[in-house]
Image: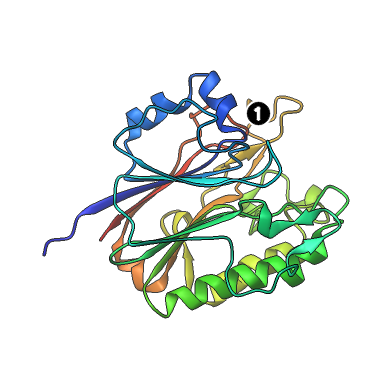
Amino acid sequence: MPKSTVKLISWNVNGIRAVIRKDKFIPFINTHQPDVLCLQETKAQQGQAEIDLPEYEEIWNSADRKGYAGTAVFTKVKPISITFDLPGFKKGYFEDKFGDASSEGRVITIEFEKYYLVTVYTPNSKRSLERLQFRQKVWDPAFLKHVVELEKKKPVVFCGDLNVAHTDIDLARPKDNRKNAGFTEEEREGADFMVANKFIDSFRHFYPEAIGEYTWWSNFQKARERNVGWRIDYFFVSEKLQKNLKSASIHQDAMGSDHCPVEVELSI
């Protein structure tokens, strides 16, 4: 059976209703026609946003708390199975003073014929790093365990807002941010462990030394206009899929959110 190319796009929309109101969402989808679209920070329940994409099946994992967090997947390819959140952990495991991350709609896992696709909206460590220990000791190891377990059955693609810039070239001002959320040693270590477990950062696979390629910008001081940004949105793939990678790209011209979409094409 000949291989076909599948186009996957991930986008932290920072509120699906807002990006639709700005008339940025549907035009982007119509232009780029992803086979599967993964969204983070939807901040909505299914049906709260008017989305006219009849060729896609919609899968939503919304937070219990209204207007907060949440993920969704829009797919033209019929899934074999769907799993929400991170299975296998006891009730309360992901709970801290900020809430229960397992009730915030942060993970969707889709099983397709030849691979698993996981989208994730990783908890932020907070400006004063109050949630850093939770990230390092609880969330990041649990998420890694999830994708490693999946990988034992089929190759894995995981994507989303990982809320970390992995290396110095993944943000505009590394020296100024070494102790700030998103660029601490503890968070970067979480990304190191992903690589150590043979998951490949698809963008760096093609562009190992590219600079100025960011996916998120602060809303202050015209950061996006000046491209003072961070690359915190990713597609990682199992090493087994390295030979299947055809392209990876960042759509910096796509507006509507403080993040921009990222894309990968695979020959599957």
Three-letter residue code for mark 1 = Arg
Q: Secondary structure at mark 1?
A: loop
Q: Is residue 185 visible?
A: no
| Above or below 123: residue 70 | above
Up the image or down, 19 lies above or below 108; here it is: above
Percent across and percent down for residue 161 are 59, 50
| Residue 48, picture quadrant | top right
Residue 195 in percent (x, y) is at: 54, 71
* Residue beneath the point at 24% across and 52% down: 5
Q: Quadrant of residue 228?
A: top right
User: Which residue lies at the image location 41% right of the left edge and 29% below the top edge?
Assistant: 28
What is the residue that sits farthest to the top in this orientation?
Answer: 22
Local packing at callout 1 (Cα closer than 10 Å; few below 14, some 14-19, many 20+) is few
| Left or right: 3, with 20 as reference point | left
Which quadrant is the N terminus positioned in? bottom left
* Image x and y of residue 210, in percent: 51, 49
Question: Can residue 22 be seen by looking at this rendering?
Answer: yes
Q: Residue furthest left?
A: 1
Q: Is residue 113 above or below residue 217?
A: below
Task: Tell me the quadrant of the picture where the C terminus can be found.
Answer: bottom left
Residue situated in front as seen by the camera: 144 or 110:
110
Q: Relative to residue 81, is residue 171 drawn left or right?
A: right
Pick whichever, 142 or 188, lies toward us. 142
| Front residue of this view, candidates 235 and 34 | 34
Count of picture labels: 1
Residue sitting nearer the eye, 14 or 108:
108
Q: Residue at x 71, y 34 (%)?
A: 218
Q: Which residue is mark 1?
A: 226
- The colour scheme used here is rainbow
